[in-house]
């Protein structure tokens, strides 16, 4: 069948034009001249500083919002917090090596509004070399007997190419310590002697500070510590007397002193820190153990008492013994 041309429908071709592409928004971009710095070998006395250069390589303003050092040993100074496109500034990083020995690695986080890399990490390292190294910073004298001197030696070693010369050793607050020195050059020695007979009576433990002077201008002084603990030859049983009772009544407790080596000794005197406390000795003769009684007066008022009894002995290794006394009266 033939249809007239007027009845033929011819689809129209419609050209649809795509919208114009939009240019990307301008963005900042943070770049550095270097992300790492090696200070090399440094001494522990002097601070070192390095400057990192930061540039805004983008097309919009760059805002640096935070600098986060990984350690309190590192301080930072930023030249500018906001950079125009193409502008640069500096981040000054200062490392304080005091207290470090050997290889130290630290970092700084730089936080900005760079949409691609908002956080960049700067790192640095240093090998901290001590000009003078002590074999130990602390000397321990344990189980000390008053009548037997104790000795120890600390070696001071200079770094390669350096020397160590000792000018003085002192500890003015510790007359029980005496010193001798030896050597000089690559290494030197401090000889320490503890005279237990000069230690404070009634004190079983203690710590002292020794100052060692040297000819090194970078390390004019070194500090050593000496800790000591006396052997208790005479012990109390119990070591503490305690009462938790109502006020208004007299109360007593027995305490025994014993000599560990079963050697006889005498109790020469007994003093209390409070007149409400009384001490009654069973025997003042020489014996390897002694029994005495501690009494708290009935006139003690309600409250908390923290007192002590100090016994003077004729034992040359332990001239005093202390017994704690506490009471909570209601």
Image (tube, rainbow, N blue to C red):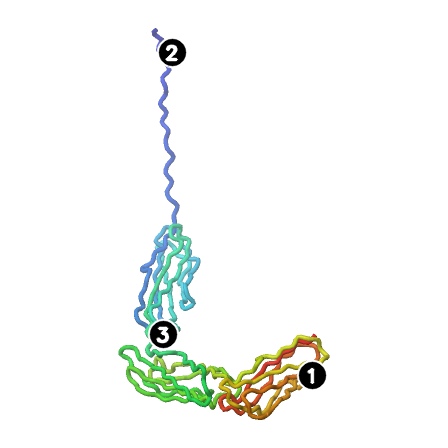
Q: Earlier in the sequence, mark 1 or mark 3?
A: 3
Q: In terms of image quadrants, where is residue 10?
A: top left
**Comparing labels 2 and 1, the label whose residue is closer to the camera:** 1
Q: Which mark is residue 297?
A: 1
The answer to whether residue 289 is seen in the rendering is yes
- Judging depth in this view, the residue of 256 and 19 nearest the camera is 256
Q: Position of residue 246 (x, y in %)?
A: 71, 75
Q: Earlier in the sequence, mark 2 or mark 1?
A: 2
Q: Circle 2: is it few (<14), some (14-19), or many (20+) Cα within 10 Å?
A: few
Q: Circle 3: is it few (<14), some (14-19), or many (20+) Cα within 10 Å?
A: many
* Label 2 with label 1: CB-CB less than 8 Å: no
Looking at the image, residue 74 sits to the left or right of residue 330; the answer is left
Helix, strand or loop at mark 2: helix
Q: Position of residue 16 (x, y in %)?
A: 37, 29
Helix, strand or loop at mark 1: loop
Please determine whether, in this image, residue 240 is positioned above or below residue 122.
Answer: below
| Quadrant showing the C terminus | bottom right
Q: In terms of image quadrants, where is residue 138?
A: bottom left
Looking at the image, residue 77 sits to the left or right of residue 250; the answer is left
Q: What's the distance in space between the residues labelled 1 and 3, CA to CA?
A: 61 Å
Q: Position of residue 248 (x, y in %)?
A: 73, 79
Q: What's the distance in space between the residues labelled 2 and 1, CA to CA?
A: 132 Å
Looking at the image, residue 292 sits to the left or right of residue 9; the answer is right
Q: Residue at x 32, y 72 (%)?
A: 42
Q: In terms of image quadrants, where is residue 21?
A: top left
Residue topped by disc 3: 44
Q: Residue at x 66, y 75 (%)?
A: 244
Q: Residue at x 33, y 76 (%)?
A: 130
Q: Which mark is residue 7?
A: 2
């Amino acid at each position: 069948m033939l249809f007239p041309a007027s009845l033929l429908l011819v689809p129209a071709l419609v050209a649809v034009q795509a919208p114009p592409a939009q240019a990307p928004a301008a963005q900042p971009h943070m770049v550095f001249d270097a992300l790492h710095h090696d200070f090399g070998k440094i001494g522990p006395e002097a601070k070192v500083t390095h400057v990192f250069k930061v540039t805004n390589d983008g097309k919009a303003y760059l805002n640096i919002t935070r600098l986060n050092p990984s350690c309190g040993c590192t301080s930072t100074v930023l030249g500018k917090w906001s950079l125009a496109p193409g502008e640069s500034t500096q981040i000054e990083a200062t490392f304080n090596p005091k207290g470090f020995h050997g290889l130290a690695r630290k970092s700084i986080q730089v936080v900005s509004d760079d949409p691609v890399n908002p956080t960049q990490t700067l790192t640095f390292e240093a090998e901290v070399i001590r000009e003078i190294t002590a074999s130990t910073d602390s000397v321990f004298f344990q189980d000390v007997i008053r009548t037997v001197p104790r000795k120890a030696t600390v070696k001071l070693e200079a770094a390669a190419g350096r020397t160590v010369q000792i000018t003085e050793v002192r500890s003015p607050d510790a007359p029980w310590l005496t010193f001798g020195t030896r050597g000089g050059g690559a290494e030197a020695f401090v000889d320490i002697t503890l005279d237990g007979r000069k230690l404070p009576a009634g004190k079983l433990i203690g710590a002292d500070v020794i100052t060692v002077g040297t000819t090194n201008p970078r390390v004019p002084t070194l500090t050593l510590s000496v800790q000591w603990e006396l052997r208790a030859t005479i012990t109390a049983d119990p070591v503490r007397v305690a009462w938790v009772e109502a006020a208004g009544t007299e109360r007593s407790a027995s305490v025994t002193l014993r000599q560990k080596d079963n050697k006889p000794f005498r109790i020469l005197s007994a003093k209390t820190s409070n007149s409400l406390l009384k001490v009654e000795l069973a025997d003042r003769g020489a014996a390897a153990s002694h029994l005495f009684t501690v009494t708290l007066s009935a006139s003690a008022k309600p409250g908390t008492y923290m007192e002590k009894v100090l016994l003077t002995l004729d034992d040359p290794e332990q001239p005093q013994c202390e017994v704690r006394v506490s009471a909570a009266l209601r």
